[in-house]
Image (cartoon, grey):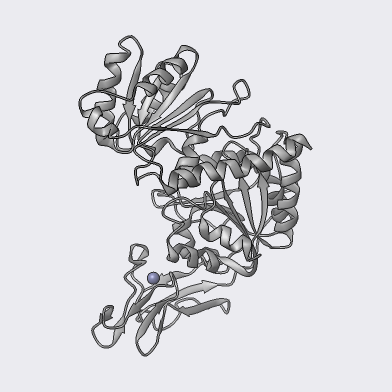
Amino acid sequence: MKLDELYGRRVLFPQVDSFPLNDSRLQALPTLRVTSKNIICLRCGTVSNKSVVAMPRDQYYCPECITLGRVSTLDKFYHVQEPNQFVIPEQILTWTGQLSSLQATTSEIIRDRMERHCRQLLWAVTGAGKTEMIFAGIAAALSRGERVAIASPRVDVCLELYPRLQAAFANFPIALLHGREKQKYQYAQLTICTTHQLLRFYHAFDNLIVDEVDSFPYAANRALLYATENAIKPDGGLLFMTATPGKELIHQIQQKKLLVSYLPLRYHGHLLPQIKIHLAFNWRKHLLQRRLPARLIKELRLTLAHHHCLLFVPHVADLQPTFLALQRVFPKIKFTTVHAADPKRLEKVQSMRAGKYQFLITTSILERGVTFPEIDVFVLGADDQVFSSSALVQIAGRAGRSLKRPTGKVNFWVNSYNRRVREAQRQIAYMNTKGRRLTNG
Ligand SMILES: [Zn+2]
């Protein structure tokens, strides 16, 4: 192992008594802290009861982060303090796109706060173009010789960010780290990784950006939050980005622990389409008899006359009955179903993009990331517990993404109103109020 692979990292070397390398920079750090009752993991922060995690001869381990290699009291981490040993190219930013004036203002605020190593949140509506707004901040950080990472809970977000960042910072090698990546780790000034990979870093980043911070599994995962804090240098900056901040982030804003910048308008300057709710009592029972709410059929017919759409259902098991019910109503229209484990998933999404299908019936897999330009969005059973309020906002945000058709219809059918549906409507209304103020003044 080369020494630079340990810069800002904690690498587990099981059961070592001494260092194999003679370099004064190399440190051995403890992996666990032992108290009278508990074991505290210094990699993921998990506190375990001693009796539960005991090994022979008074040794202990951490069960929580075991997929990264088991840490036990027999182990040490090898670590070298981050030296920021980078060769900085002359041309930093190779992106040539244009920001709208609103995007540019927000971008400047973010850049300034990154320079001061603040903790901040960019709350930008779906389709606001948030990635481009952080380029200036990243470029300035790189030019200062800082080490920067963009982390996301989702592999697909990392995979989507990588080519965009590589194009925007073409003169920088970028390390892409996630569980599916087979490439060997390389020390780089700019890193894109899953939040899970942050568990391997220690005081590495001068600025860390966490994208889609509200999404699973990050939001409720204390180990990942702990890893985030540890991956940043003690005086480093942290930027969260999301379209749908959860309670915890809102609480931090209220307590003034987190600065916030809003981008309530989409890149084309329009508001988010608001969700329209329709009641459909016992819809699943009717569906099994191949019947759908009459209003849904009517709205779908209106949409399909000029546009395409996505129809979301809560469960994979709902796909086929919905398909059969709609086949009776629309025998001449081309559509299909798609879900996460569908082997033809990419092919179907591609065909939808190419206009081969007029609509797709899908589960929540298409809530983020996948963009079709001019669609309406329908959700059958939006009150089902599989849809969190942030998922519902993301789903609604699939509509009205294009400049050609910046608005779109968002219709939800529910058995009954619930907290999550109301919260989604409330969040959209909140951002639209802010957006209206900007467009009117
Ligand atoms: Zn652990």
Residue 310: x %, y % from top left: 42, 27
Residue at 73% in and 33% down: 98
Residue 12, above or below 112: below
Quarter residue 86 falls in:
bottom right
Is 397 situated left or right of 58 in this image? right
Name the residue at the left extreme.
Answer: 289
Residue ranking furthest to the right: 441
Is residue 354 placed above or below 33 in the rendered structure?
above
- Indicate the position of residue 255 as horizontal and vertical percent values: 63, 66
The percent position of residue 160, horizontal first and vertical second, equals 51, 40
Q: Classify residue 357 by image quadrant.
A: top left
Residue placed most toward the observer, 20 or 241: 241
Q: Which residue is at a point 41% across and 54% down the rendered structure image?
A: 217
User: Can you tell which quarter of the image residue 304 is in?
Assistant: top left
Q: Nearer the viewer, residue 154 or 412?
A: 412
**Residue at the image point whose x is 63% and y is 24% from the top:** 403
Number of numbered callouts drawn: 0
Picture coordinates of residue 106 (x, y %)? 72, 46
Q: Which residue is outermost to the bottom?
A: 36
Could you say which is closer to the camera, residue 31 or residue 256?
256
Compared with residue 205, is residue 34 higher up or lower down, i.e. above or below? below
Residue 281 in sight here = yes
Tell which quarter ligand 1 is in.
bottom left
Q: Is residue 159 visible?
A: no
Task: Identify the residue at horizontal 30%, vertical 84% (top origin).
Answer: 59
In this rendering, is residue 430 above or below 197? above
Quarter placement of the C terminus: top right
